[in-house]
Image: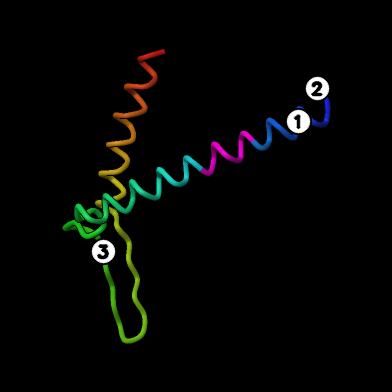
Amino acid sequence: MSWGEKMESLGRFLVLTGFIFIILGGFLMLLQRLGLGKLPGDIVYQKGNFTFVFPIVTCIVLSIILSIILNIFSRLK
């Protein structure tokens, strides 16, 4: 594999990674509009100038959704 082929494959990888991040960002913005991140059970602690947010229920819901999606994709192979 020559230097030019390596650079071309690296470029394709970076473009693909960029598209994945764009899609993921849009998906996260959509989920926020649907109320994900403010579910009952998410921990928010505010005291004065300090805010701590730990979205435990949101993490569990996203984990279940991603597990289902990945399970479906793994069965398609």
Query: Circle 1: is it few (<14), some (14-19), or many (20+) Cα within 10 Å?
Result: few
Q: Which residues are magenta?
A: 12-18
Across and down, in percent, residue 68 comes to 29, 29
Question: What whole-number distance in Å separates the C-alpha atoms at marks 2 and 1?
Answer: 7 Å
Please, which residue is most extreme toward the left here?
A: 40
Front-most of 38 and 25?
25
Give the quarter of the image for residue 23: top left
Secondary element under disc 2, as helix, strand or loop, is: loop
Q: Mark 2 belongs to which amino acid? A: Met
In the rendered view, does 45 fall on the left or right side of 12?
left
Q: Is residue 15 magenta?
A: yes
Residue 1 circle label: 2
Q: Mark 3 belongs to which amino acid? A: Ile
Across and down, in percent, residue 49 comes to 36, 85
Please, which residue is most extreme toward the right here?
A: 2
Whether residue 25 is situated above or below residue 3 in the rendered picture: below
Q: Is residue 28 magenta?
A: no
Q: Residue at x 61, y 40 (%)?
A: 14
